[in-house]
Image (cartoon, rainbow, N blue to C red):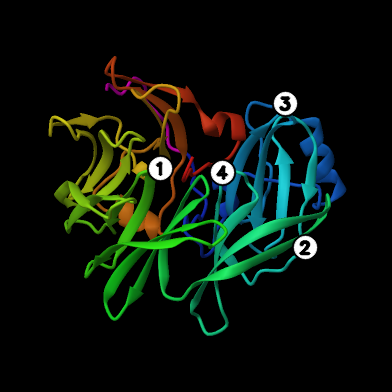
Amino acid sequence: PQNQTGTTETNPKTFSPFGGTGNSGTTTGFSSTTVNSNQTATNQLNYTQKLRELWNQPTAGAGVSDSKAGSAVRFVDKATGFVYEMQLFSPLSNRLSNTTLPLPYSAVWDAQNSSFVAQYLKGDNTVSTNVLSLKSGTTTDQTLTGFALGANISSVSVFGETIFYLQTYTGVSYGFTSTIDGKTKKQIWKSPLNELNSQIVNANSVALTTKPYQNVPGFTYLVSMGTGSVKKLLGNVPGLVSLISSDATKVLYSSQTNISMTALYDVKTGGAILITPATFPEKCVWSKKDANIIYCAVPENSLDGSSLTAWYMGQTSFTDDIWKYDLKQNTASIIEHLYSDAGEQVDVIKP
């Protein structure tokens, strides 16, 4: 696809996409009525805006659901662990729970937006991973109940009501599937590779990709959640990051050497084509309506070979636009200038 526009540089703000200091609220944009009355009035007044900030503090993670009442987002406030809900197309918002969680840094929601896997740091600096569910009380006073998933858990993915997680013991990684209620658990992966990121691709398979580092060869494997069989999708790609399509026939991936490159790999043919402008798969999402469409947040400034590592470490941040890649037509076009509508830098992750 062709780069169809030029861009101008804006002054970046401090931002760390995976925690730390900085204005991490710019990546998610979620809000509620528990802020001061001035901000609440502004949120209610401007809920029809094309782009609006819903929450101006760091969040641990969000889930979006659709119902007859409309589309709503639920999210966890990092500072308190409280759960909030915001209607996307109305001014309605609620605090759903006031259960305090100790500095949660990750919350991955299920399909019903009623349960989530939360990870947070304990006092001894170990990571605690728990499955938590909202239990109805009043609208604004639901309780959180749940169970511990286990120790030494790194990557967690959720698809529907299924959880996949990686657990490490004595240098070996084990991959498990579990139902969200914890009643059914199954091991499907065991390997000396223990620095992995996971993505549940569909109801039948999960993709595991080695954590990226510039110039270090990376690999992506597709693991059957039914049989545990393993298929290598990509291998020996320096600084590999991947995002697999829901039918597991295409892989959007980036490679980091002395340059930053984005490409599309066809699993059936074994061929790959470059995608421009370059971005990171963490900034992309496959269309649910058209298998040939990918939406990505793309930095206005060109990426270099050190961009991915610097971004992970919070040493750099980006001002993104939203691009639409049409793989069938071989075109790419900007569909949203985030800075123009937000009036500030927006560094997107996990759209």
Which of the two marks, 2 or 4, is nearer to us in this view? 4
93 is higher (above) or lower (below) than 23: above
Percent position of residue 264, x then y: 23, 33
Which of the two marks, 1 or 3, is nearer to us in this view? 1
Residue at 33 percent of width and 39 percent of height: 279
Q: Which mark is residue 111?
A: 4
Predominant secondary structure, magenta span: loop
Residue at 56 percent of width and 49 percent of height: 110
Asked if disc 2 and disc 4 are in contact, CB closer than 8 Å, the reply is no
Q: Which mark is residue 108?
A: none
Quick one: label 2 or label 4, which is nearer the N terminus? 2
Q: Is residue 166 shown left or right of residue 97?
A: left
Other-residue count near label 4 (Cα within 10 Å), few / some / many at <14 / 14–19 / ≥20: some
Quick one: label 1 or label 3, which is nearer the N terminus? 3
Residue 180 inside the magenta-drawn segment: no
Magenta residue span: 1-9
For label 1, the residue is 203
For label 2, the residue is 98
What SS does tag 3 mark? loop
Quick one: label 4 or label 3, which is nearer the N terminus? 3
Other-residue count near label 1 (Cα within 10 Å), few / some / many at <14 / 14–19 / ≥20: some
Residue type pointed to by label 1: Ala
Q: Which mark is residue 48?
A: 3
For the N terminus, the quadrant is: top left
Which of the two marks, 2 or 3, is nearer to us in this view? 2
Residue at 51 percent of width and 44 percent of height: 160
